[in-house]
Image (cartoon, rainbow, N blue to C red):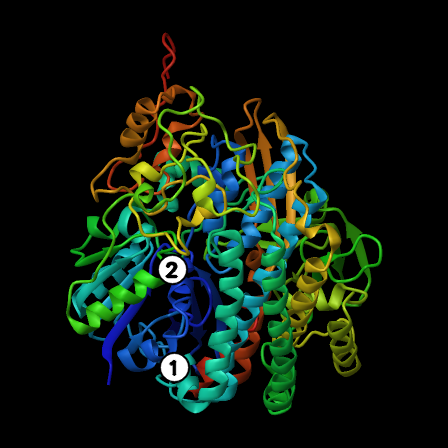
Amino acid sequence: MGVTTALEWLGSCSGCEIAILNIGEDLVSLITETLNIVHAPILMDHKYFGQCGEGVTLEIPEAVVGIVTGGVNNREHLEVLQEMRKKCKVLLALGTCATHGGIPALMNGQDQLESWEGIFSTVSTDPGAEIPNVEVPPPLDRVYACDEKVKIDMQLPGCPPNPELIGEVIVALAEGRVPVLPGKSVCDTCPTKREGKGMVDKVKRFINNVEFKPGTPIDEMRCLLEQGYMCMGPVTVAGCAKRGGPSCISARVPCRGCFGPVRRDGNQLLDMMNGLVSNGLDFKSVVDRRSVLRFSGAHGRLRPVKKRVARGKVK
Amino acid sequence: MKKVLNIAPVSRIEGHAKIAIHLDDDGNVENTFLHIQSLRGFEKFIEGRPAEEVPRIVNRICGICPWMHHLASNKAVDGAFGVTPTPTGHKLREMCQVMAHINDKILHFFFLAAPDFVLGPDADYSVRNIMGMVKAAPELAKQVVKMRQLGQMMLDKFAGKAIHPVAGVVGGFAKPMAEEERKELLQGTQTLLDFGCYALDFAINNVFAKYMDIIGDLGAIKTGFLGMVDREDGSLRLYDGKLRLMKSDGSFVDFEGNEYIDYIGEHVEPWAYSKMVYAKSWNEGFDMALTEPKGIYRVNTLARINVCDKISTPKAQAALETFRNSFGRPAQQTLLYHYARLIELIYSCERTIELLEWEGITGQNVRAKVEPKAGRGVGVVEAPRGTLIHDYTTDENGCISGANLIVGTTHNIAPMNMSVKQAASTFIKDGVYSEGVLNQVEMAVRAYDP
């Protein structure tokens, strides 16, 4: 019998779950032999309130390994995360939402109430609609990464995480050993040609395709940062590389930092601006610098912009 | 005594939902609710972002159908910047989108829905899942895992990322397709087409025939339908075309995606974060009454199979004819979503092959010239879960100043609520219910693949 395992998703998109399925040939033996899955909403029908829904407290079965995806946005996510912590011996935060907040943490840069009011008064919404508040979980004050709310034993970022690394982590957890994970930057795994300082002094928006010779491998393409594009490889932790190069760069598209900072507590925005300056690029030419934090916006890094109060006006 | 049964989480679906069944003093169904539990706020936090970056942000709305959001978003930004993608760029995007439908359909039918049919709706929850299928039907399960993986890896290799893609760009596509890539994709898709045909035969013989009584009844409601069709010949389209809104009597109107505000509206209930989209142009308001619903239409596979006049590829067209001979047009039975899904699986494979055989597909001119500017654009595609609308306004810097998103599943929220009520009221009588009965209520939701 395999290692008892519970899976849960919080404020997530299911991309991490699909990445688990993308493990490939080993998937069948992984989910039927290595692991004994006791709870996993996307794959099986274990229920929180008993199988006939008559219970009153949310319960997840005990398990050796717990895997959580998604960030913590609302009271239900928090309750589920706390129950997972209580019932699982080892808790893995899987994917950048769980480890750093991810894209949904961009909400932390907005005024929540104002935003929600806006969402329920769009052009296509019936006039007079109000924010739902009956039997739906109320939001927290902001989006949190899992480790801001409970103790997390292991982190595997990525949007989505690399299936190969998911396999390694799960097997390592089942075998009770430390997994082998890359700790360097995306640049360390990128074979593009670097020639020193860049050719331009302003950061280009990605409105033209990068320069490369079609049909040639990416090691014949010049570094995208040197081509003048904002490529966040230097400040992003490695892990996405498959088939000999980072995922986005192999599609000839610059990195946007979806695996989060190189050091867990690193600040991608500051590090990136430093990186641009050292490459001779003017960091002020980045149109929307705040969105450099788009994958690591939890951990208090992204806050609403304070509104300027016009002088002389009294409310 | 009154009581509430909370089926939470609704499982083997893509999102986060809970079903609450309210029973009266005699144990009969008083009311039911499908509560949609999550709201993340994408419409708001993309404001201020450079529009060309947004297709790489909104794909995170859904990890099962990221290509749909990625490409609807690219189409909307094209519109706002006034760019027409190059013909090769346009077709490369369509190929990726249609190919992403292939994996999605294999995932939904075999991983999420099939355990109810292969192992039975009353089987114990510990085996009524893909792990149980591996034990009960090991050869089939292995084949299914292999085929889904093949489709995903083909996309991943060609486009860099299959989940949360980046290769679609405003103006077209980020890279051209090499001839070797084309040959490899063609070979893989042919294998998937064979599997798709096998899957439909398997389902007709082993699922639909066996469960015909449930199919006729479970979650059955009568509604209209919305889906995309070809602008010229009314055939099924997933990436580009006009929209067709059909009433339950089969009459319909066609309109362009950017006219959506004149035809559909969004109703809000206090007990679900998801809005409920309805047919505003019918001028009858919004009502989920089972006997005489108002403004209610459905989207997703069954809707598309109902609204199209035909399918442009031969094997899928033959399957459509068999389907229509048995169930008519429009077919209303909710569980037929699964049947329609497998017809679309065949279309998606055939269409991918058609695109790969188009002479311009390996062309080098993949991206048109782009200038960020102020404007408005509406991008519409058919996601596996239904008609997906991204509507953006940009400022003079080409940054997003306003966004309105209507995602596939939201059109089906009201119909799913109706199907849940229909199923629960049919199965739960005088306080008698069981795990198997409650799972059948969930099967009514699962058919919609929310």
| Residue at far right of view | B233
Q: Is residue B362 above or below residue A122?
A: below
Q: Residue B103 lies in what quarter of the image?
A: bottom right
Mark 2 neighbour density, 10 Å: few (under 14) some (14–19) many (20 or more): many
Is residue B313 found left or right of B440 in the rendered image?
right
Relative to B397, is A104 above or below? below
**Secondary structure of residue under mark 1:** helix
Give how far across and how far down residue A238 sits, in percent. Answer: 30, 48
Q: How far apart, in angstroms, are the residues tagged by discs 1 and 2?
A: 19 Å
**What residue is drawn where x is 41% and y is 68%?**
A21
Which quadrant, please, contains the N terminus of chain B? bottom left
**Residue found at the very far top of the displayed protein:** A312
Taking the spot 52% from the left edge, 86% from the top edge, the residue there is B117
Q: Residue at x 22, y 65 (%)?
A: A83
Q: Which residue is at the front of the view, B172 or B325?
A: B172
Image coordinates of residue B378 in percent, x first then y, are: 65, 41
Q: Is residue B220 visible?
A: no
Q: Amino acid at mark 2?
A: Cys
The kind of residue on which mark 1 rests is Met
- Alpha-carbon neighbours of circle 1 within 10 Å: few (<14), some, or many (≥20)? many
Element class at badge 2: helix
In the rendered image, which residue does mark 1 sit on? B131
In the rendered structure, find residue A16 and report the number of the disc placed on it: 2
On residue B410, the disc is none
The image position of residue A186, as x and y in percent, is: 33, 44
Pinpoint the chain carrying mark 1.
B
